[in-house]
Image: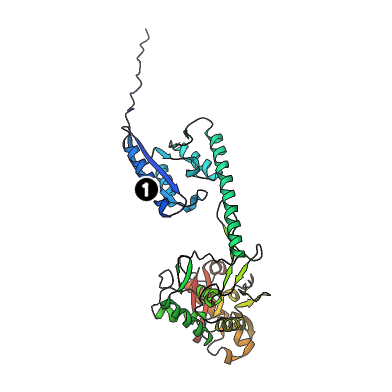
Amino acid sequence: MKKIRKIEIPKKDYAKKLRVAAYCRVSTKYESQKSSMELQKMHYENYIKAQPNWIFVGVYADYGSRSRIAKRPQFQSMIQMALNGQIDCIITKSISRFSGNTVDMLQTVHVLKEKGVTIWFEKENIRSTDRNIELAITIYTMLAQEEIRNMSENIQWGFKSRFEQGVTLNNYKYFYGYDVIDGELVINEQQAEVVRNIFDWYLQGMSLGQIKHKLEEAGIKTASGSDTWYKSVIQEMLCNEKYMGDSMLQKYFTEDYLSGKKSKNVGQKARYYVHDSHEGIISKEKFLEVACEMNRRKNITIDSDGIIVKKSKKYNPNNVLGNILECEECGATFRRRTEREKVVYRCATRMEKGRDACKESPTIGEERIKEELGKRVCGGEYDEEVVRKKVERVLVVKNAEIKILYF
């Protein structure tokens, strides 16, 4: 006789509480928006805590674009917690608050669904566990995406109209030498004195590297409060027309309204030059004098409109050292040449204009450079690929010493 034993289904703990979080987002940090954000956060916290079978995890809130998840740190933190198994359910006001990008939305819903995390969109009254959720999300986010596109076009049209009227958009977070007060550039006298010194030092013959060292030795901080000055920043300052009281508008433009990617305007769109848009820190005469000096040093050039632009550096894939060697005294590149059957590098200014134009610049042998780079960069033997990937520039100083600047 067969004996049969029934194996009972184990009783599940259906009383297990859900760990619930909420997500809020507003587009700007204006006072009215801040008030709205606080009300939303308070509402969700009270609502979640009032549910007997829910555990309140937190309210995550961002200010910013609905289409750019990368610029929403709280959103990313919440998603990571959910993927780590710390959140079971996310409540948000609507699909458009969660994301206005169809691809990002579907990817997020998919990865959370695989982890067993539910998203509840209140306004649409749908959950990520519903049937045909992907179709619903696609429709709603496409509508949101179209709204973003229309809004972006309206904003760009508004910018264009203001540019045509010569209205400057002074929305700088940091602008050395100026404070932004009520949308206007107002001279910061303490920083302005440093700006004047930088222009004077350059005209006195100092290189960008020497100015950098002088600023750092004096303990002068950058606009963002850093102790380190970069030569590229100093060069940008010397080229920036705003220091003489003028403004070039639409130097950059938004290429993609979804990603927010900005591109330098090198002719894709019209630019607008406004004379005397604000009070200058230096005179126009001194600014143009610096421009001529820069042009002489061949670091920049002047275009057909008389606008100062940085000259792009030609890259020679067959001569890596020629691309990265730079004279600390005058800022010129080093050129490769053969002398007495030995390969050496020499400052271009000295070669073209003689020793008086760059008095301290040495001639340095190729073997010497490779030996130094091998020890200090490659861990032994010189490796061109390692140098190409790691080294941005090599400053050659007097006594044929070198300073290595890494990426």
Of residues 163 and 249, the one drawn nearer to the viewer in this rendering? 163
| Residue topped by disc 1 | 38
Query: Residue 366 location in percent, x, y?
Result: 57, 79
- Outermost residue on the bottom side: it is 356
Against 22, residue 220 (above or below) is: below
Left or right: residue 250 versus residue 397 is right
- Outermost residue on the front side: it is 165
Of residues 161 and 148, the one drawn nearer to the viewer in this rendering? 161
Q: Quadrant of residue 229?
A: bottom left
- Outermost residue on the right side: it is 304
Q: Quadrant of the N terminus?
A: top left
**The residue under label 1 is which amino acid type?**
Glu
Of residues 149 and 31, the one drawn nearer to the viewer in this rendering? 31
- Outermost residue on the top side: it is 1
Marker count (numbered): 1
Query: Residue 363 location in percent, x, y?
Result: 56, 86
Against 197, residue 247 (above or below) is: above
Against 69, residue 360 (above or below) is: below
Residue at the image position 41 percent from the left and 51 percent from the top: 32
Helix, strand or loop status at disc 1: helix
Q: Quadrant of residue 10?
A: top left
Q: Is residue 336 visible?
A: yes
Query: Residue 90 location in percent, x, y?
Result: 41, 39
Query: Residue 175 location in percent, x, y?
Result: 47, 70
